[in-house]
Image (cartoon, rainbow, N blue to C red):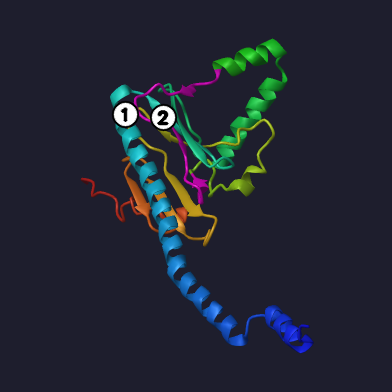
C-alpha cells in the first residue's frame, strides 16, 4: 500500500512553480537578449530606410538626365496608402502649380467646367486632358517600399506643406489622392522633399530626400528636414551687377 504522505509530497513537488531566483534569472536572460536584438533590429530598419532613400535619389538623378536627352517631362506619382511611387512620362507642355491656392483654383475651375458638360463631352474632355501615361522605358518605373519602411510625407510648392495620409482626407472626392513631383524636359526639377520613416520603433525619425529646383541636385539627409530649412541651394547674396 502506497504511503499517502509520500504521494502528497510528490504531487506538491509536481505542482511547484518557479522560485523567485528562477524568475529573476529568466528576466535577466530576456534583458540581455533585448539588449542584443534591439540595436540589430534598429540597424536593419535604418539600412532599409537608407536604401529606400538612396534608390529614390538615384531615380531623380536618372530622370533629370533622361528628361533632357528625350525632351520629355516626367512625373513621380506618390501613393501614400499603398506605400508606392510610379514614374509617368508626359508632354513637354505639362505645367505645375506654384502654390496651393493656384492648385485649388485650377481644380475648382475644372470641376465647374465638367459640371456643365454632357456625359459624352465629359468623357471626351477627360480623355484629351491626360498628358501623362505609363512610361515605356528600359528602367524600372514602379516601386514599393520594403516592409516597415514607408513614405510618410511629400512636399512640393503646389501643396505648400508636407502632405501626409491625414491630409489626403481633405481632398475632394473627384480629386486624385496621388501626390506629384515633376522633372521637366529642360532639366528643371520641382523643389521636392520626401520623408522616409518606419512604423515600428520611431516614426518621427528617418531620412529626407531633397531635390533642388533648377539644378535638380539631390540630397539624402539622415534626418527629417522641414521644407522651411531646406533652402541651402539659395545663395546668401545675389551676383554683383555692373553699374
Q: Earlier in the sequence, mark 1 or mark 2?
A: 1
* 229 to 191, vertically: above or below: below
The label on residue 179 is: none
Q: In the image as oriented, which residue stretches furthest toward the top?
A: 120
Residue lying farthest to the front in this orientation = 1
User: How many C-alpha atoms fall within 10 Å of the one at disc 2: few (<14), some, or many (≥20)?
Assistant: many
How far apart are the alpha carbons under marks 1 and 2?
Answer: 9 Å
Q: Residue at horizontal 48%, vertical 37%?
A: 85
Q: Residue at x 37, y 24 (%)?
A: 137
Residue 37: give x, y in percent of width and height.
Answer: 45, 66
Locate the N terminus and report the quarter of the image it occupies.
bottom right
Give the x, y percent position of residue 80.
56, 42
Q: Position of residue 13 (x, y in %)?
A: 68, 83
Is residue 212 visible in the rendered structure shown here?
no
Does the magenta portion include 122? no
Residue at image x 57%, y 40%?
A: 82
Dot 2: element: strand
Q: Please give the range of residues in magenta.
A: 129-155
Is residue 161 positioned above or below 130 on the image? below
Taking depth in this image into account, of 215 and 210 the one nearest to the observer is: 210
The residue at which mark 1 appears reads as 66
**Where does the image place residue 230, in percent across and percent down from the top left?**
40, 54
Q: Is residue 12 above or below residue 44?
A: below
Task: Work out which residue is located at the far bottom of the displayed protein and give it.
Answer: 5
CB under 8 Å between discs 1 and 2: yes
The numbered dot on residue 74 is: 2
Task: Decide if residue 123 is on the left or right side of residue 128.
Answer: right
Amino acid at each position: 500500500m502506497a504511503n499517502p504522505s509520500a504521494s502528497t509530497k510528490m504531487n506538491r513537488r509536481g505542482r511547484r512553480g518557479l522560485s523567485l531566483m528562477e524568475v529573476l534569472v529568466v528576466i535577466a536572460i530576456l534583458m540581455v537578449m533585448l539588449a542584443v536584438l534591439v540595436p540589430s533590429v534598429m540597424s536593419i530598419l535604418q539600412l532599409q530606410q537608407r536604401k529606400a532613400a538612396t534608390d529614390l535619389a538615384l531615380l531623380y538623378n536618372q530622370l533629370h538626365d533622361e528628361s533632357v536627352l528625350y525632351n520629355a517631362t516626367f512625373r513621380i506619382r506618390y501613393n501614400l496608402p499603398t506605400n508606392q511611387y510610379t514614374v509617368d512620362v508626359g508632354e513637354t507642355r505639362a505645367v505645375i502649380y506654384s502654390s496651393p491656392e493656384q492648385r485649388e483654383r485650377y481644380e475648382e475651375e475644372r470641376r465647374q467646367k465638367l459640371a456643365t458638360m454632357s456625359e459624352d463631352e465629359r468623357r471626351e474632355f477627360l480623355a484629351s486632358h491626360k498628358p501623362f501615361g505609363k512610361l515605356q522605358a528600359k528602367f524600372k518605373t514602379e516601386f514599393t517600399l520594403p516592409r516597415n519602411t514607408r513614405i510618410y510625407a511629400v512636399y512640393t510648392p503646389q501643396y505648400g506643406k508636407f502632405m501626409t495620409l491625414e491630409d489626403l482626407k481633405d481632398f475632394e472626392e473627384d480629386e486624385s489622392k496621388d501626390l506629384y513631383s515633376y522633372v521637366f524636359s529642360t532639366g528643371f526639377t520641382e523643389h521636392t522633399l520626401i520623408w522616409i520613416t518606419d512604423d515600428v520603433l520611431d516614426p518621427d525619425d528617418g531620412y529626407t530626400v531633397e531635390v533642388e529646383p533648377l539644378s535638380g541636385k539631390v540630397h539624402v539627409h539622415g534626418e527629417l528636414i522641414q521644407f522651411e530649412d531646406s533652402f541651402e541651394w539659395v545663395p546668401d547674396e545675389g551676383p554683383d551687377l555692373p553699374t
